[in-house]
Image (cartoon, grey):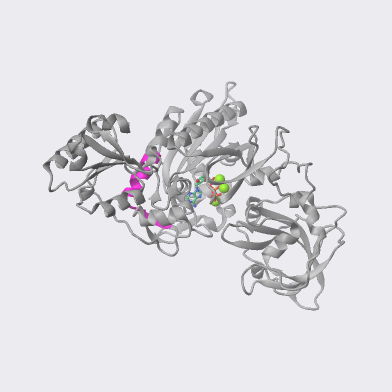
Amino acid sequence: MRASRFFISTQKEAPSDAEIVSHQLMMRAGMIKRLGSGIYTYMPTGLRVIRKVEAIIRDEMNKAGAIEMLMPLVQPAELWQETGRWDKFGPEMMRVKDRHGRDYVIQPTSEEAVTDVARAEIKSYRQLPLNFYHIQTKFRDERRPRFGLMRGREFTMKDAYSFDRDLAGMQASYQVMFDAYSAIFTRFGLKFRAVAADNGAIGGSGSHEFHVIASTGEDALVYCPTSDYAANMEAAEAMPIASSRPAAAHALEKTATPGTVKCEQVAALLGIDLAHTVKTIALTVEKEEGGKPGGKLIKENWMLLLRGDHELNEVKVAKVPGLANHRFATEAEILECYGTIPGYLGPIGCKQPVTVVADRTVANMADFVCGANVEGFHFTGANWGRDVTEPLVADLRNVVEGDASPDGKGVLAIERGIEVGHVFQLGTAYSEKMKATFLDENGKPAPLQMGCYGIGVTRILGAAIEQNFDDKGIVWPSAIAPFEVVLCPMGMDRSEMVKSEVESLYAALTAAGVDVIVDDRGLRPGAMFADWELIGVPHRVVIGERGLKEGNLEYQGRRDFDATAVPVAGMVDFIK
Ligand code: ATP
Ligand code: MG
Ligand code: MG
Ligand code: MG
C-alpha cells in the first residue's frame, strides 16, 4: 500500500464526547467517523483492523469445525414472538415496520433466525453436531451508547450457534468453542481472561465471558492467582459468602444523618463500593396509595439497584413483584422482569414522601432524603433500615480482594476487564419454544441442544487500544494492526538511492507476506512519524541517504525508545 493512494486523516484533538482513550485515539487516528449516536462509519484504516480481526476469528472458527453462513439483518417479528423475546427484549431491540405495517426486528442477536434454519434443515441425529456462525451487523438500542465502538448501537458481532443431540454433545461443542476463543484472543496478541458468568436471565447450565484486561474496563473480574477460579463479579457474588470476612451487610447497622443523601452516601451506608459493583437490595416500601398524602398506607416490594459505573453513579429503584425475600437480583433479572430498568427514583412516582423499610423487622431507622445524583430525582421522607439480627447477606454480598477463593485454593484478586466474548450453554430453551426437533436413534423426536457463542468484533478494537496505548497514540499488536510496517523515506523525491531502496524493501516485505505501507506523501519527518505513532503501526523503517551510505536502515518498534541501525540486507528477517 502507498499512503498517497490510501486515505489517512489524522487529527490533533479528539471531539469532546470522546471520554475514554480508545474512543479519542480512534477518532484522532481517523479510524472511525460518527454518523449518529452509537453509529459509526468504519474509515479505511479502521476497517483494515476489523478485517484482520474477522480473518483470525474466521480461521479459528473454521478450524474448530464451525460453518459460516449469513443470516438477515432484518428479521420478521413472528420469529421473535415465538420465543417470547419480542416482549422480553425491551427497548434495546430496534423494531421497524414495512410498508404493509408488518413488524420487523433489526437483529440484536440471531438465536431465532438460526433455530428457524435448524428446525427446517436438521432432521436426523446423523446430521449432528452442527455449528453455524456468521459475522454480521447487530443493532442494539443501548440505553447509553458511548465509548465509540465499545458500546455502539450498530456494531459487528461474530455469533455462532451449536446444535447437538444431547447434553453431553452440547457440552463438548461448548468446550470446542471455549478453546477456539482462547486461540482467537491469543492470536490477537491481547491479555485476556475467561471468567465464569452468571446466566440467570437466559437460564441454562454454563456460561463464560472472555474479557480483555484493561484498567478502564466496565466489569470487575474476580480470580484466584493460585488456582483456576475466575468469575465475573455477578457470578462471584452468587457464590457463598467468604467466611474469612464479616458480611458487608453489617455496614448497614450504621445509621445515616438526616438530610439530602446522594447515592454515594447510600452506598457508604450499605458498605458498597459504587465504583466497582452492581448491587441490589430487596426492600418493602410503605407508601400512600396513589402517592396521595394522607392516603391509605400500602406496601410494595421494591428492588433497589445501586449501579457503579466508572463515570456515573446512579441509584435506581425498580419495583419487582414478589421479590421481598429475594436472595439476590442481578441487573439481568430486573431487565428480565421489566425489559428495562426503570430510570431513577422519579419516574416511578417517588417524589411523594414514602417509608422504605427492609423486608424484615426494622431495628435501626434513619430518616433522610435519598435518590439519584440528578437534580429533581431525590425523594424525601424515606426511612431506611433493616434487621441487623437477620442480615440480608445475600443481597449485600460484596466480594473484595483477599477473600478466600471459593475453591479453597488461595485468596481472591480483582481486576477490570472489557467483555469481548461470551459463550453460553443454551440447552433446549429455544428449540422447545420453536419446536426444533430431530429424530434420535430410536426414531423419536427430541429437541435440539443448543449453545451460542458471541464475539464483539468491533468492540475488540476499542478493547485492544484500552490495553495498548501511550501518549503518542495507539500501539496495535502486530496481528491486528492496520499495517504491520511503515516505510518512511527521507527525501524520496530528491534521492534516487532512497527511492530505489524503498521500492526494493517494499517488494521484499510484500513478498515475505508482511503488510507494509510506504509513506510517499512527502511530509516532513516529524509530521510523518507522528501520524504513524498515532495510528499505531508496530514497526517503522526510516530509509535515508545517510544510513544507506553506511549500508543501514533505521528501525524503530512502536514501543522502542530509540531507533536501531539494521543492515539493509537483514531488514526483512529482522522484522519477520
Ligand atoms: P454488555 O454486557 O457489554 O452489554 P452483552 O452481555 O449484552 O454485552 P452479548 O449479548 O453477550 O453482549 O453479546 C456478545 C458480545 O457482543 C459481547 O461479549 C460484546 O463483546 C459484544 N457487544 C455487546 N453489546 C455491544 C455493543 N453495544 N457494542 C459493541 N459490542 C457489543
Ligand atoms: Mg448488553
Ligand atoms: Mg454482559
Ligand atoms: Mg454477554
> Where does the C terminus fall, quadrant-wise?
top left
Magenta segment range? Answer: 39-54
Magenta stretch holds residue 45: yes
> Where does the N terminus fall, quadrant-wise?
top left
Q: Position of residue 553 (x, y in %)?
A: 24, 38
Q: Is residue 5 visible?
A: yes
Q: Position of residue 539 (x, y in %)?
A: 33, 40
Q: Residue at x 78, y 53 (%)?
A: 249
Left or right of 97 on screen, residue 11:
left
Magenta stretch holds residue 122: no
Q: Main secondary structure of the magenta part?
A: helix
Up-down: is 474 above or below 115?
below
Q: Is residue 431 visible?
A: no
Q: Quadrant of residue 307?
A: bottom right
Q: Position of residue 260 (x, y in %)?
A: 71, 73
Left or right of 54 on screen, residue 350:
right
Up-down: is 476 above or below 168?
below
Please tell me which residue lies in front, 20 or 208: 20
Q: Quadrant of ligand 4?
A: top right
Left or right of 341 on screen, residue 98:
left
